[in-house]
Image: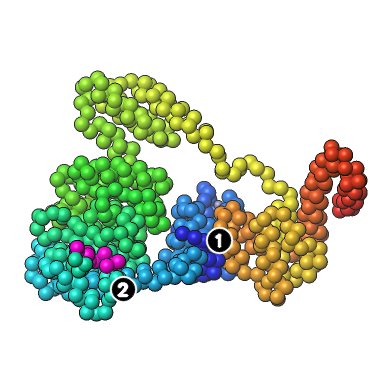
């Protein structure tokens, strides 16, 4: 995916009112011009978070957090910039086309995708109408206790037990062979005729998170194989990138967590019982893409897979992938021999809610699974179990948690707690050594802000607080003299607007930045400053600071050049440069 065009980012920022967005996480109260709330980014006692609807920025007077609606989502949801943008685009119902895809070559692809969404809708309608005209599939759903309202909501259908009923229908309503083939709804025989891929199956349209039909799943009515058949890869259907039911979950409003099941029927059952914050991963192995998709909507996930061996393996893999993506994971254990669908239909919602309440943490679950099948009376197997458990616990940061788990393991094995703790320490040490080899790119929190940066920020703050200062400022400094790259870009925009007599728009200036740190710096400009008689004196000082720094930079450069000339016996050049150096040093002194 290429870059998202700036106009799109701006549109996304403008369509997501910052007060509404932040209110979804912390209550805000209007006080004067701004809104105030308790800051979610530090242990805030009083309301320190100020939000300006008009400027589209927030500031915390406690911890200094600052930014726009995108950085707020990045921070609170722990997302990358691009994913925060997508989250907000979805929230506002905006489709993102990146710069590459807007170019000619890819606009063809967009058109093809749109045609595929359309043919899928027509196919789904055909399957849906078949369902009500055929007793067998309809009764099958009735026997599985699926309500008509659910059939409607999920657009369930039936593919006829014929070789070309869908193909002929699609031809009749005007589709070309090529598109029908690309859609994956038909297959090509050896003698180049087309036939329906799905025959005599209950049909599940697969929606993406925006509610478009991207493909189909088909289930047999009896015990024949394969039980489920899915659409092949097409330009709109990619295995492992989507979550079945997510569009419905998002629509009904997420309570902060998602329940993840394996299959179509489980998911539909959960929805029928009113548990709409659920999705199905379809196919047992959860993928990284799916974890990232979940992360756009919530932080906590309950894995609720089948109790069989495949389900257990998928759960362990799922925990790993979800935790790698910084999601909190709990595991819901369905009693043996049942899947969530059967469990709900046998015992009902109340019992299912109890399973959710009694869900296991991921560490506990992993330890349980490490114990599974091991005979703890056998010394070798016992030591194997303790080693595996120690590896699992070595990932924990909280010492108290570790102690609690260790005492559980001691209860089960009789192995001395200290020995287990030593083993954990040993594993921690080796993994930490590995980590030290990675380059640490994070910013040093003790880094002191250079004086010129503070000066730049304050000049711009004054400027946007009172645009009458523009004439005073523009005669003394130009955007080119700004040193910090983000402030240079911002000042350029602000100067341009003011030159045209327009008030600089915080929202559109912030849309130019992708880096969280940059957005924070630039958002800080839009914090009001009181302008009074002293302001001019302050401004003079700030401007001098920047000019001084610029001259120091040139002087540094000159010194290096002069040294090089002297080394190479280039006397003339060196003299000329020295003259320049003297002139600049004088200028610096005058400042
Ligand atoms: Zn704060």
* Left or right: 413, with 289 as reference point: left
Residue found at the very far front of the displayed protein: 191
In depth, the one of 462 and 262 nearer the eye is 262
On whether residue 292 falls in the magenta region, the answer is no
How far across and down, in percent of the image, does residue 499 sit? 72, 73
Q: In which quarter of the image is residue 366?
A: top left
Q: Are marks 2 and 1 in contact (CB under 8 Å)?
A: no
Decide: is 562 above or below 496.
above
Disc 1: residue Cβ within 8 A of ligand 1's nearest atom:
no
Does 304 sit left or right of 37 as displayed? Answer: left
Q: Residue 118 carries which label?
A: 2
Q: Does the magenta stretch include residue 184?
A: yes
Task: Give the residue displayed 84% in from the left and 37% down from the top.
Answer: 567
Q: Along the line of sight, which residue is nearer the eye, 403 or 365?
A: 365
Range of magenta residues: 181-190
Q: Which of marks 2 and 1 is in front?
A: 2
Whether residue 271 is visible here, answered yes or no, is no
Query: Residue at 36% across / 47% down in the picture?
Result: 322
Q: Residue 29 carries which label?
A: none
Task: Please give the label number shown on residue 68.
Answer: 1
x then y, percent, for residue 443: 59, 44
Considering depth in this image, is 7 or 103 the residue closer to the camera?
Answer: 103
576 vs 375: above or below: below
Q: Badge 2 local density, few (<14 within 10 Å), some, or many (20+)? A: some
Q: How is the image coloured?
A: rainbow
| Point 20% across, 41% down: residue | 309
- The answer to whether residue 80 is left or right of residue 530 is left
Is residue 319 visible in this depiction of the protein? Answer: yes
């Amino acid at each position: 995916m290429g870059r998202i065009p700036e106009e799109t980012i701006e549109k996304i920022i403008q369509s997501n009112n910052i007060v509404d967005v932040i209110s979804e996480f912390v209550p805000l109260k209007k006080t004067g011009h701004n809104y105030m709330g308790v800051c979610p980014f530090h242990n805030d006692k009083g309301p320190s978070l100020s939000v300006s609807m008009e400027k589209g920025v927030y500031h915390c007077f406690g911890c200094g957090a600052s930014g726009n609606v995108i950085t707020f989502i990045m921070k609170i949801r722990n997302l990358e910039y691009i994913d925060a943008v997508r989250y907000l685009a979805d929230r506002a119902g905006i489709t993102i086309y990146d710069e590459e895809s807007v170019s000619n070559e890819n606009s063809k692809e967009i058109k093809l995708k749109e045609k595929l969404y359309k043919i899928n809708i027509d196919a789904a309608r055909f399957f849906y109408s078949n369902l009500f005209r055929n007793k067998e599939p309809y009764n099958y759903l009735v026997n599985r206790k699926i309500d008509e309202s659910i059939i409607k909501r999920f657009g369930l259908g039936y593919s006829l037990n014929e070789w070309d009923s869908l193909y002929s229908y699609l031809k009749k309503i005007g589709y070309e062979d090529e598109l029908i083939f690309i859609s994956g709804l038909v297959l090509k025989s050896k003698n180049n005729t087309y036939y329906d891929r799905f025959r005599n199956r209950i049909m599940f349209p697969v929606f993406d998170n925006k509610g478009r039909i991207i493909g189909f799943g088909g289930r047999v009515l009896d015990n024949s194989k394969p039980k489920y058949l899915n659409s092949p890869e097409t330009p709109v259907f990619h295995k492992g990138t989507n979550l079945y039911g997510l569009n419905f979950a998002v629509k009904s409003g997420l309570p902060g967590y998602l329940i993840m099941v394996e299959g179509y029927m489980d998911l539909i059952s959960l929805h029928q019982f009113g548990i709409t914050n659920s999705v199905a991963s379809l196919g047992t192995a959860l993928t990284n893409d799916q974890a990232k998709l979940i992360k756009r909507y919530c932080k906590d996930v309950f894995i609720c897979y089948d109790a069989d061996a495949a389900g257990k393996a998928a759960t362990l893999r799922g925990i790993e992938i979800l935790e790698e993506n910084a999601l909190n994971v709990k595991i819901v254990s369905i009693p043996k021999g049942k899947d969530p669908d059967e469990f709900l239909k046998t015992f009902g919602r109340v019992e299912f809610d109890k399973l959710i309440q009694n869900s296991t943490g991921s560490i506990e679950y992993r330890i349980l699974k490490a114990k599974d099948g091991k005979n703890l009376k056998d010394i070798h197997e016992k030591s194997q179990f303790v080693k595996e458990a120690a590896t699992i616990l070595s990932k924990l940061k909280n010492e108290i948690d570790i102690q609690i788990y260790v005492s559980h393991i001691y209860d089960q094995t009789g192995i001395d707690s200290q020995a287990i703790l030593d083993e954990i320490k040993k594993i921690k040490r080796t993994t930490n050594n590995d980590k030290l080899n990675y380059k640490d790119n994070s910013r040093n929190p003790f880094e002191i802000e250079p004086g010129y940066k503070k000066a730049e920020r304050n000049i711009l703050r004054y400027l946007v607080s009172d645009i009458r200062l523009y004439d005073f400022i523009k005669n003394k400094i130009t955007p080119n003299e700004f040193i910090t790259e983000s402030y240079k870009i911002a000042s350029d925009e602000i100067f341009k607007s003011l030159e045209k007599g327009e008030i600089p728009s915080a929202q559109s200036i912030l849309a130019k930045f992708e880096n969280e740190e940059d957005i924070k710096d630039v958002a800080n400009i839009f914090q009001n400053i009181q302008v009074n008689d002293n302001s001019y004196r302050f401004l003079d000082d700030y401007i001098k600071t920047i000019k001084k720094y610029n001259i120091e930079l040139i002087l540094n450069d000159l010194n290096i050049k002069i040294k090089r000339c002297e080394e190479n016996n280039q006397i003339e050049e060196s003299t000329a440069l020295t003259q320049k150096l003297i002139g600049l040093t004088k200028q610096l002194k005058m400042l």
